[in-house]
Amino acid sequence: MKNNSLGSKILGWSLFLPVASLLLVMAVNILHDVATGSNPFSFFMITLRETTGNGTILYGRIIDILNRGSEVAILALGMTLVVSSSSGTDISVGSVMSLCASFCCMLLAGYGVSSTNDLAVPLMVGVLGGILLGVLCGMFNGTLVAFFRIQPMVATLILFSAARAIGLLLCNDLIVYVRNDSFAVFGGYLSIIPTPLVIAAVCIVITSLVLRKTALGMYIQSVGINSRASRIAGLNSRRIIFMTYTICGMFAGIAGIVAASRITSADSNNIGLYNEMDAILAVALGGNSLGGGKFNLAGSVIGAYTIQAITTTLYALGVATTQAPVFKAVIVILIVAIQSKPVRDFLKKRNMEKQRKEVAG
């Protein structure tokens, strides 16, 4: 029996969960603005503002969310592929971000230098060095998961624990400051648009094109659904899983460069902190199953910016920075519960009963 009602089509839409969550966050902001006597549509207002350091820039809460949420959006791209192929998560991405940021700033400042205005090496050497280190970290994780068949969470726990400490060693336990305008542009503005948003958009477009124009997306999903059947069909499942972890490491490196450029320094203790949780939550919020298989990249991106909107909203409601992860954890529990098989089977059963009543009536 097929149900073609509008409600069923909306509920069956692949982006229903992320879009509904984003609209709910917007509604909370509107209610908060009304309660405080502000313009009810101030959340959506975008203006041009003059600044001393960046000139004229776009300003508004939406711009701030898009800007601040770009690192998590970049991480969510790699996390989506990892979850889809290996049915596991890479919990090291936040620490790898910190390590790549530290390595980049160490190269740009020079080993043993804690603060500089002049670059010790060309800018691209430091940036590409940080991204390459992220790729190597991804290859390390991918080797453990794909070839040694270690559980993804256990395999990535190694760099989760060690990468941030290695970054501190590279920087001699110091915060390395690179106060250089050419480096600061990665976390600053391109004309009136935030550069992190531009970088995230480029990563999203390239990843989407590669997955759509090649068979890679189908291969990743096939391996995630049934790796044994994929091997029988001629796919090298180990190589595909290894590739997804490598790509995830690359995106962690890019996000680390953006985060370091934003504060023009390598703060190993704080860069990427809790970002692995946000990336995983973005994937789940995007309607992707954490059990692997089919994925929706657009949903993960919307989920990433929804996470930042939630964070911004929590701060606006007066929630302390230290308490925000607690609320995010509750959201993770609710999302995972909604996606669980018993809940889905219950909703499906209720829907079928409703259809029978409509036919009988």
Image (spheres, helix red, strand yellow):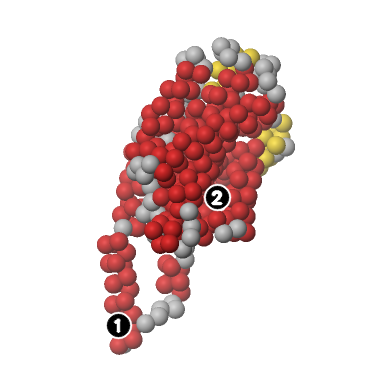
Residue 99 showing in the rendered view = yes
Say which of 29 and 236 sits in front: 236
Left or right of 206? Residue 56 is right
Mark 2 belongs to which amino acid?
Phe
Give the number of the mark in front: 1 or 2: 1
Q: Quadrant of residue 200?
A: top right
Label drawn at residue 357? 1
Q: In terms of depth relative to the viewer, which is nearer, 143 or 120?
A: 143
* Label 1 neighbour load within 10 Å: few <14, some 14-19, many 20+: few
The percent position of residue 302, horizontal first and vertical second, equals: 51, 51
| Residue type indicated by callout 1 | Lys
Quadrant of the image containing the C terminus: bottom left
Q: Tell me where residue 213 appears, x and y as whole percent.
A: 62, 59
Q: What percent of the width, then of the height, locates residue 242? A: 48, 45
User: Could you say whether the residue bearing mark 1 is in a helix, strand or loop?
Assistant: helix
The quadrant of the image that shows the N terminus is bottom left
First in sequence: mark 1 or mark 2? 2
Q: How many marks?
A: 2
For this view, does 150 lie left or right of residue 301?
left
Left of 43 or right of it: where is 361?
left
In percent of the image, x 61 and y 38: which residue is there?
Answer: 196
Nearest the viewer among 122 and 15 is 122
Say which residue appears at 38% left-offset and 32% top-offset: 158
In the image, residue 79 lies at what x, y percent? Answer: 47, 46
* SS type, badge 2: loop
Determine the residue positioned at 40% across, 57% down. Answer: 227
Q: Is residue 65 above or below residue 4?
A: above
Can the viewer see residue 31 in this picture?
Answer: no
In depth, the one of 189 and 115 nearer the eye is: 115
**What residue is disc 2 on?**
41
